[in-house]
Amino acid sequence: MKRTEAKAPAQERRLTGHPVSPGIAIGPLHEAAETALTIPERRLEPDGIAAELARLEEAVARSRHQLQKLKGRLSAMPEGSQAELAPLLDMYLHMLGSSRLLRLVKARIEQDRQCAEAAVQAVAEAQAEAILAQAGPDRAGRQRRADEVREVARRLLRNLTRQPFRSFEVLPQGSILAARDLRPAEAALINPARFAGIVTAEGGLDGHTAVMLRALGLPAVLGAARLFDKAEPGCTVIVDGESGEIILNPAKASLEAARRKLAAQTRARRALARLQHLPAQTRCGVQVDLLANLELPFELPMIAESGARGIGLLRSEFMFMNREDVPDEDTQARSYQDIVEAMDGETVTIRLLDWGSDKDVESLSAYLPEHAEPNPALGLRGIRLLLHHPKLLETQLAAILRAAAAGPVRILVPMVSVAAEITATRAALRRVWRRLQRRRNLDLPEKPPPLGIMVETPAAALAAPRLAREADFFALGTNDLTMYTLAADRSLPGEVRLYDPLEPAVLRLIHLTCSFAAGAGVPVCLCGELAGRPEAAALLLGLGVRQLSMHGPAVPRVKRAIRASTLVFCEELAGEALAAPDAAAVRALLAQAAF
Ligand code: PEP
Ligand code: MG
């Protein structure tokens, strides 16, 4: 970025890039610069080879640890970011496993006696160049793969040289974040409340970073190639995420025009915010409960602003993440209690620890099966794993029972597929309740909280009448229900992407569960990502859902969609969707029905 020298008023300049995330942002431009990496070129002594290999191993382990940590944060991110980043992080982790990249690096250290940094740099560059030199029409795909190799190398090099990663937190609040390039894993670290917008000199419309920024909801323009030739630190910038225009040092007229657009944008947001105090009910008077999903306690203020009436899903995994030991009963009780108190009388649904499979929780790695499972998603996960570790289960139940003295709480059991799992959990709850009653000076609620189950396996949906005899409520987990129904992971490549909660088979299971539950008088809350999609709200009402739990910011838009519909309309739409041939046809129905 150029330094400020001349005193003459700076001239307005216009640049264009890829309009990646809509919205207008005005603010001072600040660069998140990356310190250049210095790669040492040392030739190793023969007796230094083992130590160098150990140094490489340590950097690999550190890199893997950082990526695992980032994976742990995924559930707190918007759905778009999760879907984009999860497969990418898996790819990075794979490259840091038994990959060709690492084999070649080790060979260079052993045979050519190159230091680890030089070996990583040389091998990664050679691989990236080879990928780029391949023939074929998919240039963008080759570029992405080359970028992935370079990104893994960059992380390894930072960890080998102990040179810090760049930080975004040091930039002034409200600024426009400028970067030469922004990697997807870095986009995951950006707190959207800190910045007005984002501009970069490199990057395209369809890259992983673009998807991540759209999900964050920050106005962003990527790939404005001449950004750093023209911009001076701190200069005022207008970012138009709709047209892709960046205006540096805007003249008075440009600034006024942008402020008008910004005011219109703010008015639209306020109109949504005004819905906060209006009921979520259809035009014909059907009431819907809109609740919030909570992954991390820092989201509580956002939930308060959203107008959500309680927490429909508290993913308790957060308590166990980013720490080496397992939190004890007192620590857990305090943490749940803080949330219950903050919700001020609104119900908090605390889900028991759902870990195992791709839900990797560091502090619990000692509790996982000793041998790698051939199909982890079909293996020990959620309540199956908890029932194998009664102490862990009972400690958590005790903590929740204690927190329930502070306000209304419900307990939710994850990954149930057969009735025996809820029966065993209820037995554990009774044991813990009796034990706590014998302890003195303990505040407890009058009776144990309701115990409900996640309906997120096809078995649970199909066995709903039987499970309704055991469970006090149901929570439809459409994220897993979709995956298990279609036997499809989200990370399947584009040409075979099957994962879609709008697939009629999944809708049918939602409908079945709601009908069975209504017959048995058991309340159902839908808390998968589908709940937060306003275009799907009428369909879900038509399928029989009357409680929706979603990430806080989605509540106003979903409420607006509900207030615009009638039950007759919703049921007709649901009937057509259930009869539709596939998810694409359902999407077309929803687009037609949009208000
Ligand atoms: C679900 O599966 O829909 C759900 C809400 O649980 P999670 O996303 O935490 O697996
Ligand atoms: Mg789930």
Image: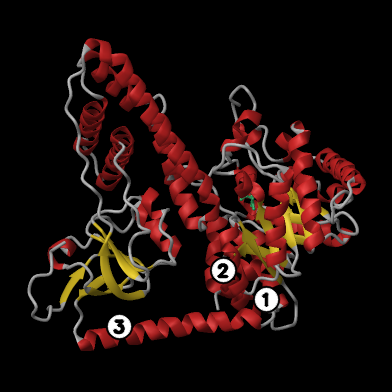
Residue drawn at (70%, 54%), measured in percent from left and top?
A: 334
Q: Position of residue 202 (x, y in %)?
A: 23, 55
Numbered disc in front, either 3 or 1: 3
**Mark 3 and mark 2: Cα distance apart in space:** 27 Å
Q: Which quarter of the figure is the C terminus placed in?
A: bottom right
Q: Secondary structure at mark 2?
A: helix
Q: Residue under circle 1?
A: 569
Q: Residue under circle 2?
A: 302
Disc number placed over residue 258 in the picture, else none? 3
> Do labels 2 and 1 touch, CB within 8 Å?
no
Left/right placement of residue 485 relative to residue 469 reads left
Numbered disc in front, either 2 or 1: 2
Asked whether the viewer can see residue 186, the reply is yes
Q: Earlier in the sequence, mark 3 or mark 1?
A: 3
Q: Earlier in the sequence, mark 2 or mark 1?
A: 2
Amino acid tagged 3: Ala
Q: Position of residue 13 (x, y in %)?
A: 15, 75
Q: Nearer the viewer, residue 350 or 377?
A: 350
